């Protein structure tokens, strides 16, 4: 298939410029990472470090480790209760929350892809541009994919700096990341982004407004919420192998959604709805 790459790039850049000009789109991409990856980790790690409780009280906080697998308990063998808490909080308690950030970025930008064009009354001009349906679809998908992947990597670096700095007083060394984070950042997070893009762009092309699309596409966050609940309650522990397996399933679903979106997208239907 011969694709007009300059046209795809032009559509992508146009959407990225619109994102930077729309506060409803870019403000959540700034506020949510600050809350999930800076403020909450700082509070969870620093509070017991600077306002220590007794070892017995701290031991109660990490009783969930009694049911934890060996890969989590082994690094804690020579740690004090405070150090064990800091290690577990920094490496495992916020892991599912980290996944919400790139997922949210992909969902918000892709929700603005077609529904936002309708609200700004620019969709009709876009649909009559001399590009194929596939080129238009790919341009929209890439406009959300690229910033989501960038945010994924930047969020990982930001979180690593925050957690290591906050826990350094208790640990006396760098202790993040644990092995689970590598497949989560470079395998599972991109898979979730692909799934969010496939679902949201498909919904956006059929919705009437940006807010409607964002509300409907919010369902893609539910699997991450399930991971959070599983880990908090001790029913599920994210080992590297489990992350790779979950990522494989999500990749299949995500690529399937993107394929369905690309195959079913027809600008004629959009023109008829304007």
Image: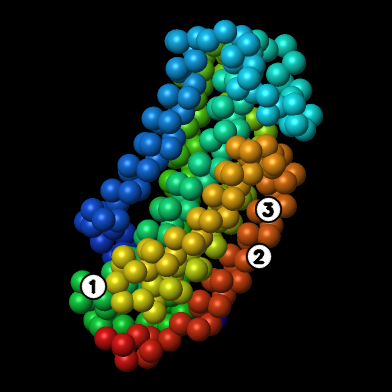
Q: Secondary structure at mark 3?
A: helix
Labelled pair 3, 1 in contact (Cβ < 8 Å): no
Q: Quadrant of residue 155?
A: top left
Whether residues under marks 3 and 2 lie with C-beta atoms below 8 angstroms apart, the answer is no
Please identify the quadrant where the C terminus is shown.
bottom left
Q: Residue at x 63, y 59 (%)?
A: 250
Residue 105 image position (x, y, % from top left): 41, 53
Image spot of residue 135 (x, y percent): 43, 77
Q: Which residue carries the number 3 mark?
A: 246
Distance CA(mark 1)–CA(mark 2): 32 Å
Residue 249 pos. (x, y %): 68, 60
Nearest the camera: 73 or 138? 73
Residue appearing at x 72%, y 52% in the figure? 245
Is disc 1 surrounded by few (<14), some (14 to 19) or many (20+) residues within 10 Å? few
Q: Is residue 165 visible in this depiction of the protein?
A: no
Q: Is residue 128 left or right of residue 42?
A: left
Give whichever of discs 3 and 2 has the lower sequence position.
3
Residue 25 percent coordinates (x, y): 30, 56
Q: Which residue is mark 2?
A: 252
Mark seen at residue 119: 1
At 37% from the left and 36% from the top, the residue drawn is 34
Count the labels in the image: 3
If you read the primary sequence from the N terminus, does the residue marked by circle 1 or circle 2 appear first? 1
Foreground mark, 3 or 2, reads 3
């Amino acid at each position: 298939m011969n694709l007009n790459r300059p046209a795809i790039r032009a559509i992508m850049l146009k959407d990225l410029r619109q994102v930077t000009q729309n506060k409803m789109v870019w403000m959540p991409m700034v506020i949510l990472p600050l809350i999930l990856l800076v403020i909450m980790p700082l509070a969870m790690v620093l509070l017991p470090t600077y306002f220590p409780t007794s070892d017995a009280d701290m031991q109660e906080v990490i009783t969930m480790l009694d049911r934890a697998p060996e890969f989590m308990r082994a690094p804690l063998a020579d740690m004090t209760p405070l150090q064990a808490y800091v290690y577990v909080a920094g490496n495992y308690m916020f892991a599912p929350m980290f996944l919400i950030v790139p997922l949210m970025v992909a969902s918000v930008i892709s929700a603005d892809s077609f529904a936002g064009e309708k609200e700004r009354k620019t969709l009709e001009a876009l649909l009559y541009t001399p590009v194929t349906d596939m080129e238009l679809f790919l341009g929209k998908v890439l406009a959300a994919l690229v910033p989501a992947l960038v945010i994924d990597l930047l969020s990982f670096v930001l979180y690593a700096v925050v957690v290591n700095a906050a826990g350094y007083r208790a640990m006396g060394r760098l202790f993040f990341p644990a092995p689970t984070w590598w497949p989560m950042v470079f395998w599972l997070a991109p898979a979730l982004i692909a799934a969010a893009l496939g679902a949201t762009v498909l919904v956006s092309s059929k919705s009437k407004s940006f807010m409607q699309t964002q509300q409907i596409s919010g369902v893609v966050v539910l699997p991450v919420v399930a991971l959070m609940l599983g880990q908090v309650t001790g029913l599920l522990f994210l080992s590297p192998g489990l992350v790779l397996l979950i990522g494989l399933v999500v990749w299949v679903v995500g690529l399937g959604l993107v394929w369905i979106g690309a195959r079913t997208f027809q600008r004629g239907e959009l023109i008829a709805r304007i």
